[in-house]
Amino acid sequence: MKFASQIHFSLLVIAFVAPTILSQTSTEKESQQSRVANLKFSDVRAPKEDWTGPGSLIDPATSINSSENVEPGAGAVESAKNYYRAGAARINDGHYKEAIASLKVALELDPHSSAVYEELGYAYFGLAEYEDSIKAYERAVSLGPTSLFTRRSLAIVYLTSKKPEQAIPPLLEASRLEPKNALNHYLLAVAYDDSDQLDNAIDQYLRSLALDPNHYRSYIGLGAIYTHQSRSKEAIGLFRKAIQLKPELGEGYIALGNVLNSTGSLKEAIHHYELAVKLNPEDPLAQNNLGVAYLNIGKKKEGLAAFKNAVTLRPQDGQIHLNLARAYLHVRDRDSALAEYNVLRAIDSSLAKIIYGEIFQNRVLKVRD
């Protein structure tokens, strides 16, 4: 199994003869896109300026034969550099399709500009067209000059598109170019983490923290690995540090709640889940895991309410529907559990079969990753 910067959904075991629900906290990798979504814009996109040297944009005064094939409308810009600038501006405004159109004109005028390809890669990334983004960034790298931002951005697209092994080489090069940059080591840790190279991931998380003791996400990522390795005491310390650094974010409270739940500290786990929900009532993960913890201490109504909130927030998540169905069974509401089974049939047939068996056979079934 792969591990990342967030510990995900708990799985329930429901027994009609038992007074409480036991739980096994599972660890599921957070989507790669969410793991890079909170990076600063400047971290994944180079500052905009006029490039010079190999691969630079053409001078506006230079006559380019290919410009004869470009038919700009009234008031349109007259050079590749201006088309590039227009594309970059549209990216800043979030208008990625318009940006791509401008950047493609710039490439007609100057097909060897690494700067234009870099912007094109970012625009495609903004549209979640990852394969096109990768091609553009790879072209930018091949044209040069060597760019830390370009290599790091290429790696981020690889991570987002679930190709962590391919993210490692550009991140190693980025780390070589700027070895004291904590972000480079964090992203490399994520790539190793996603590739199941946990020893290398731990090493890179630790390097990131040595360079920047306030790197919040490295504490979360390293804590997730330690949780999996049953190094609960170390994981708890890391998550507490993350909360100290970013008390306004719910992620640390959820991670800490999960590891506390796994060690049997249920009341303390509930306290942290409740804090996460208070910070962000729209977080389905916090609501789901709060439901598990409530049911484990016998608070059936509170647990059921938390699962209902979670499924409303993430209606296509089969695991939440399974948890909700099992909660209904715990309070002897088979009709509602059956309704959840019918929903699951369209979402995840394997989970639907699990709950079907529990509804009609009253058997205890524990699901693991």
Image: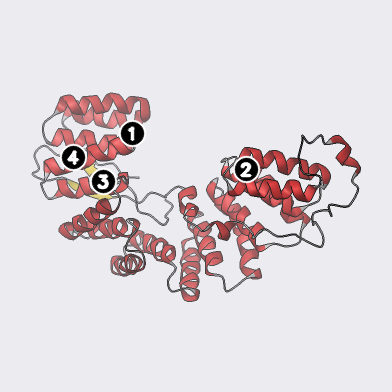
Tag 2: amino acid: Tyr
Which of the marked residues, 2 or 1, is nearer the chain's N terminus? 2
Tag 4: amino acid: Ala
Residue depicted at 21% across the width and 46% down the height: 292
Pointers 3 and 2 in contact (C-beta within 8 Å)? no
Q: CA distance from mark 2 to mark 1?
A: 28 Å
Which of the marked residues, 4 or 3, is nearer the chain's N terminus? 3
Q: Which residue is mark 2?
A: 124
Q: CA distance from mark 4 to mark 1?
A: 15 Å
Q: CA distance from mark 4 to mark 3?
A: 9 Å
How many numbered tags mark residues here?
A: 4
Q: CA distance from mark 4 to mark 2?
A: 40 Å
Residue 301 bears which disc, if any? none
Q: Secondary structure at mark 3?
A: helix
Q: Which residue is mark 1?
A: 315
- Give the mark toward the camera: 2 or 1: 2
Q: Which residue is mark 3?
A: 287
Q: Tell me where residue 197 appears, x and y as whole percent.
A: 50, 60
Q: Secondary structure at mark 2?
A: helix
Which of the marked residues, 4 or 2, is nearer the chain's N terminus? 2
Q: Secondary structure at mark 4?
A: helix
Q: Which residue is mark 4?
A: 305
Q: Quadrant of the C terminus?
A: top left
Residue depicted at 35% across the width and 62% down the height: 229
Residue depicted at 18% across the width and 60% down the height: 268
